[in-house]
Every structure is written in C-alpha cells, then in structure tokens.
C-alpha cells in the first residue's frame, strides 16, 4: 500500500462516525441534556473525552446530581448516561465514567441501609463488574510471595536434591475469581462495589485529583465517624487533617456508616495508599494528602472499634508509611530500608563488650 493510500485510510478512520472523537462528541451531546451547561469548547477540542474528564465545572455538576436525595433511581437520566457511555467501548470515555465511581459508590453504599431501590446506581456498578469479570476470564488475581524453599532467580544452588523436593509456590489471592451477576443482592453488594473500586484503582493514575478527594471524603462517611478522629491530636499516627462528610445531600453526619468487609476494604486501602504515597503535582498535593490521611485515620479508628486485626494492621501501616515520608521531608521509596535504622554490628559489639565489663 502506497503513502497516499495510507493517508486516505487514516483520514477515513478519523472521519468515521464510529471513531473515538465521534463517540466522545455524541456522549457530550447526550450529557448536555442532563446537566445545566457544557462549554462548547469540549466538543471541538482535540480529544473531547479527555477534555470532558478534566473539566472541573462539568464534573461538579455531575457530582451534584449524583448526590441529590432522589438520585440513583431506575429512571435517572444521569445513571443511564453513565451506563451507555461506559458501553461505548472507547477507553477515554471509560475514564470519564470511572472518574465518578467514588460518588456513585459512595452515595449508593451510604443509602443501602435505607432499603430503597437504587436501580440506576446498581446498573452502573453491574456494568463495571461485568467488564472486570469478562476481562479476567474466570481467573483470580494472585501474587507469588517470597519463599526460602524456592531459590531466587538471582542465585544458583548446587544442591540438586533441592530440585527434587516438590513444593508448591506460595500464592496469595489478591482478588478471588468472579461469578457473573445480573442483580445486586445485599450479600453481593460489597463484592460488586469492591470490584468497581478495583477497576477505578487500575486507572487511578489518570484520574483527576478532585475524584480522589471525593473518594477520601466518602471513606470518612463510611467509617461512621464525625470528621477526623485525630484532628485535635496531630501527633497521633501521622498528623492532623480534616474531611467533610456532610457533603452528601440527604445524609446526616455519621449516618452513612456501612459494613466494611475485607473484599470492600482492600480496594479502598489501595486507593488511599495511592493518594497518600504516589507523586502528585505540588499545587494539589497538600489537599489530597490531608483528605487521604483523614480518611485513613477514620478507617483506622473504625477498625479499632470493630477489633478487626487485619484492618488495624493495614490502616496502621499506611499511616506509618505516610509519617515516614513526612519526617524525611523528601520523596521516599516505601520499599527502601532507611539507613538510620540499620544496626552496625561493630558498634553494637563494642557497646555490648563495654556493658559486660
């Protein structure tokens, strides 16, 4: 195929009514009938989907509609738009929908105790769950843990008998295999929302900071605590901070407390870990760090109240990692052992000898 043919084919693809730009423009046009105002510049931008993703005014309007007391019903036009947009098949439009997952999951879970139908929210969450279920193909997500019975790939062993010893790899299941579900029952609710949050976490590096802050504020609501439990004690586990759980319309302070099983708490803590430890632009780092720290401290206090050892260890570890970063005053690799915590054997031996004398 010559250069002219390639150019013609590329132009035809770009102008195709089913191309990414056309899908994004159609999605923006549909959204304009739901929200009050959309800047005309979005549709004419080079990448309309990414422009929509990072537009704070449109995001604020969508968030306000999702937080209304009557939102999430079966005839909710915004939920229908989120559902249709996610099924467009365009990766950038997927990001637009995922940007609002914290608000959808936050409002939905906070209202679950009211026993009112929220078919609109459930359709969106089930669409995300089905997407992950199909992508995994029935497989669970596992990681291999270090095991001294298996030599490292960087070392050689001269003991041939070790190869004859049949030992299974030490596998840890990060996320169990998924079964298809067409409805949301109370026994499945945490799992389905947890999978949606796992999908959100897989794209979190591309999410606007405002979406992450929304998530952190909902974590405080889910904990059932009023504000930051350590707000008046800045030295407690990582310093002070604050969050605003009253931003959910129709929800009183502390009324959004929900059950926090591990299948829901695990993806929540992964997201909070990113918010506290991942690189963020300097002008946004302080806001995000304060919101994430307040959320983690609220969940830590909740885990202490529930006497949940696994949750206590996980939330406490996150807060200590953050404190290490604050104390160092510079970017820290959490996997690197600080030099000041390494014991020098010669000095220690000398001290022990002097004590013995």
Image: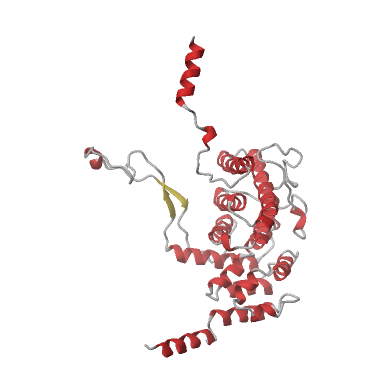
Tell me residue 7's x, y (percent).
46, 87
For residue 118, side relative to residue 349 (left or right): right
How many marks do you count on the picture? 0
Tell me residue 135's x, y (percent).
46, 65
Tell me residue 2's x, y (percent).
38, 89
Q: Quadrant of the N terminus?
A: bottom left
In front of the other: 290 or 286? 286
Residue 22's image quarter?
bottom right
Question: In the image as oriented, which residue stretches furthest toward the top?
Answer: 357
Tell me residue 304's x, y (percent).
64, 38
Question: In the image as oriented, which residue stretches furthest toward the left?
Answer: 160
In front of the other: 138 or 198? 198
Task: Identify the residue shown where x is 48% and y is 11%.
Answer: 356
Q: Is residue 137 above or below residue 157?
A: below
Would residue 112 be visible to someone looking at this image?
no
In front of the other: 51 or 70? 51
Residue 124's image quarter?
bottom right
Q: Is residue 343 above or below residue 79?
A: above
For residue 226, side relative to residue 273 (left or right): right
Q: Is residue 268 above or below residue 230?
A: below
For residue 337, side relative to residue 52 (left or right): left
How was the colour assigned to the protein in this rendering?
secondary structure
Residue 71's image quarter?
bottom right
């Amino acid at each position: 195929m010559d250069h002219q043919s390639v150019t013609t084919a590329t132009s035809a693809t770009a102008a195709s009514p089913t191309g990414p730009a056309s899908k994004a423009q159609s999605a923006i046009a549909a959204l304009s009938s739901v929200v009050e105002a959309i800047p005309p510049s979005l549709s004419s931008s080079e990448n309309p989907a990414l422009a929509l993703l990072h537009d704070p005014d449109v995001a604020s309007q969508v968030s306000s509609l999702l937080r209304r007391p009557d939102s999430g019903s079966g005839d909710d036009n915004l939920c229908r738009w989120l559902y249709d947009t996610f099924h467009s098949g365009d990766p950038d439009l997927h990001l637009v929908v995922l940007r609002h997952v914290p608000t959808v999951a936050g409002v939905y879970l906070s209202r679950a105790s009211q026993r009112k139908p929220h078919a609109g929210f459930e359709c969106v969450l089930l669409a995300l769950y089905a997407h992950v279920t199909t992508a995994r193909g029935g497989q669970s997500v596992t990681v291999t843990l270090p095991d001294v019975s298996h030599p490292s790939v960087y070392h050689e062993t001269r003991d041939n008998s070790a190869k004859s010893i049949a030992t299974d790899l030490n596998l840890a299941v990060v996320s169990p295999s998924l079964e298809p579900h067409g409805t949301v029952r109370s026994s499945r609710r945490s799992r389905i929302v947890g999978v949606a949050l796992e999908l959100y976490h897989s794209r979190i590096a591309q999410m606007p900071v405002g979406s992450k802050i929304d998530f952190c504020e909902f974590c405080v609501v889910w904990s059932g605590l009023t504000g930051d439990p350590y707000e008046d004690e800045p030295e407690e586990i990582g310093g002070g901070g604050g969050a605003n759980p009253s931003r959910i319309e129709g929800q009183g302070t502390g009324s959004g407390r929900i059950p926090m099983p591990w299948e829901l708490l695990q993806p929540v803590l992964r997201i909070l870990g990113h918010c506290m430890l991942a690189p963020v632009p300097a002008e946004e780092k302080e806001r995000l760090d304060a919101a994430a720290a307040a959320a983690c401290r609220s969940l830590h206090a909740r885990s202490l109240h529930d006497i949940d050892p696994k949750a206590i260890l996980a939330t406490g570890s996150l807060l200590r990692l953050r404190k290490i970063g604050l104390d160092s005053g510079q970017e820290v690799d959490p996997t690197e052992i600080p030099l000041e915590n390494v014991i020098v054997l010669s000095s220690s031996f000398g001290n022990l000898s002097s004590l013995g004398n």
